[in-house]
Amino acid sequence: MTRSTKAGDGRATARAAELTHAHYLIEKALAERLRSAPREERRHLYRELYDELFQRVPDHSQLHNKASSDVRERHWRELALVRGLLRPGAVFMELGAGDCQFALELAQDAGQVIAVDVSTEIVKDLLPPANFSLLLSDGCNVPVPPASVDLAYSNQLIEHLHPEDVRAQLQAIFTALRRGGRYLCLTPHRYTGPHDISRGFDDVATGFHLHEYTSRELCALMRECGFVAIRQLVGARGRYLAVPPLLVTLLEGLLAPLPQRVRRRLGNLPGLRMVLHRLMITARRPD
């Protein structure tokens, strides 16, 4: 490697760090506006602030195709997981659909696919198939008729909601599901975070992850909203075992007294990572 190449790499690294820090400052300031806003103001702020973020951070990862091999592999594993829960002809709904690529992939398997998001900035040029619809939400509501969805799915959504709005959205998902319908929720675990742009700057999430959850917190909220048969999927690389949440909450209880940085190191150890890196929780509306 030549000296000039090393210098170029150094400038690129410094530039990347500079862009990351600029993104962090923008997102943290926007997130603070959302955290401190009253409920009624948040109804329109979700859309406004996310649109502003994508406009001010044009290199944001959500605005570009995720091309790395690990991201592609995770994408296909999650598609396989959802396809295993999806009956032929079913109505599938993804909340927090982002660039809609995941929902579009499932349009060939489901009878109808509904993508719900707070912003259309990412998908301005989307040309969807006939059985696909994109609906705008205010961050809490689920704009579909009651009892119209067979399988609801969200991945890295619930942590983006204001903590005061999470119960309202879970209740709206419950109402949208048909009797016996299921909800699959994927969200990063707080003990291995923060998982937003504030990682590397803060010990807790200060960006648009307004609150990162533990299994105990999220399962309790689901039960309060009427969900039953709550199970956590534990495993890795597409192989998962459905276990009662109690087993995970007992582990959380052992780690809870430790400092966050210690919890993060332990939670990212190979064995514990299968349990604590991400929460994957399934729940059902009673028959």
Image: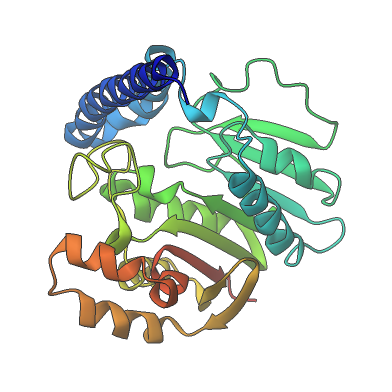
How was the colour assigned to the protein in this rendering? rainbow
Q: Is residue 176 left or right of residue 189?
A: right
Instruction: Please name whichever residue, 262 or 120, is drawn nearer the observer in this view of the structure.
Output: 262
Quadrant, the C terminus: bottom right
Q: Residue drawn at (20%, 34%), measured in percent from left and top?
A: 38
Q: Residue drawn at (59%, 54%), measured in percent from left and top?
A: 153
Q: Residue drawn at (39%, 75%), measured in percent from left and top?
A: 272
Mark count: 0
Percent of width and height locating residue 25: 22, 24
Instruction: Please name whichever residue, 224 or 238, is drawn nearer the observer in this view of the structure.
Output: 238
Percent of width and height locating residue 75: 65, 49
Percent of width and height locating residue 30: 26, 25
183 vs 14: above or below:
below
Furthest toward the front, the residue is 2
Residue 149 in view here: no
In the figure, residue 184 lies in which quadrant? bottom right
Residue 117 in view here: yes
43 vs 113: above or below:
above
